[in-house]
Image (cartoon, rainbow, N blue to C red):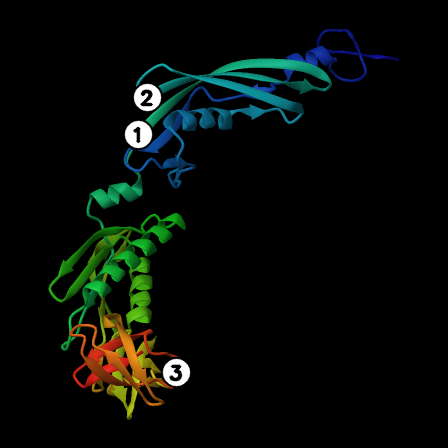
Amino acid sequence: MQAICHRCGLPTDEGLCQQCTLEKAKLVSYPDQVEVVICSVCGSRQAKARWQLPDSRSVEEQAHQAAVDALCLHKELAEPQIELSLRKVGATRYLANINIDGSFRGQSISEQCEIPVRIELMACDRCSRMAGKYFQSTVQLRGNAVRSMTSGEMGECKKTAQDMADSGYHGGDHLSFIQEMKEVKGGLDIILGSTQLGRRMARAFVERFGGKLLETAKLVGKKDSRNVYRSTLLVRFPRLKRGDIVSFRGSLFSVAGFDGKATLISSLREGRRSSMNEENSETVAILGNIADALAATVISKDDEVLEIMDPENYRAALAARPRDLQIEPGEEVKVVRTADGFIVL
């Protein structure tokens, strides 16, 4: 006995007939309005209560995508084809006209709908905090009793700080920003939106330049019944810096880096690696720095000594020849001038 459709009475294999199934099924559903929240400062978009990183899409492109994302299609709607045209109807309003073609249980279907799209411009959490001078930590970079930070160190620190803040932001930390960076007497202050960023940055400076790190915290209030602190991270640069040429235990070394309290050094003659403890690094004689090296022409040579032309007054001068240095008269070498004469690198 053949079943009949209980809705229209026509014969059917089971349940509703195909036409009634199509009329009853809700193939496309959508909200009465779609809101797109965009930061008016940086252009980032809010999605599911979280701010996304800004991208290169225009407001119209984001409105277009939001309308498409708002569509809910029936799970049995096969091979849906969506065509959308966006029309601006106000300063912050658009109307999305949408056509959906596909097939449902073997029958071709076509649906049309209109979705109003409203653009809401507001400042994201990050931009609001930056505008409000919000900060959690300050990294203080300072020289020491013997020397101040050099202009080269200052420039490198500024670039490193900006690169680390940008990297943290693109990694998803919306508090990874520099509120202010200013040169002060004795060094550089970097005021940051995140304590975690401040700690990472301070450790990076110590690894790069050596020195000591001291962190202090100050109670500034309460939030959600929890104490709120602001931290200050002081990085005190060491007496020695990378590239310094020092006389240590009868040999010449250049400062290669830092490892905790130890200063890593490399012999200018044999190339061997060694290290100095904190006490020695505070007293060792500094002869110059590799960054100040000049090019000098070799006049003559023997196994132990090079005769070179002083690059400033063009007079002949003698300098010890580094072991295994292959050089011929007329070629150039890099030299550093010291109070005791030239050092060949």
Mark 3 and mark 1 lie on one chain; the one further toward the N terminus is 1
Amino acid at circle 3: Gly
Q: Residue at x 23, y 81 (%)?
A: 342
Q: Position of residue 62 (x, y in %)?
A: 42, 29
Frontmost of labels 2 and 3 is: 3
- x and y percentages locating residue 14 in the rendered image: 79, 17
| Residues under numbered marks 2 and 1 in contact, where contact means CB atoms less than 8 Å apart | yes
Q: Earlier in the sequence, mark 2 or mark 1?
A: 2
What is the spatial separation of the Cα atoms under label 2 and label 1, in whole angstroms? 9 Å
- For marks 2 and 3, give the CA distance: 68 Å
Q: In terms of image quadrants, where is residue 21? A: top right
- Front one among 135 and 288: 288
Residue found at x 37% / y 79%: 327
Residue for point 45% across, 24% down: 64
Viewer-nearest of discs 3 and 1: 3
Check disc 3: other Cα within 10 Å, few if <14, some if 14-19, many if 20+.
few
The amino acid marked with disc number 1 is: Leu
Q: Residues within 10 Å of mark 2 (few under 14, many from 20)?
A: few
Q: Residue 333: horizontal and vertical position, in percent?
A: 31, 75
Q: Amino acid at mark 2?
A: Thr
Residue that numbered label 1 is attached to: 121
Q: Residue at x 25, y 58 (%)?
A: 158
Mark 3 — residue? Answer: 271
Q: How far is mark 3 from mark 1, CA to CA?
A: 61 Å
For the residue labelled by badge 3, is the local secondary structure a helix, a strand or a loop?
Answer: loop
From this viewpoint, which residue is outermost toward the top?
9
Q: Which residue is mark 2?
A: 92
Q: Toward the viewer: 306 or 242?
A: 306
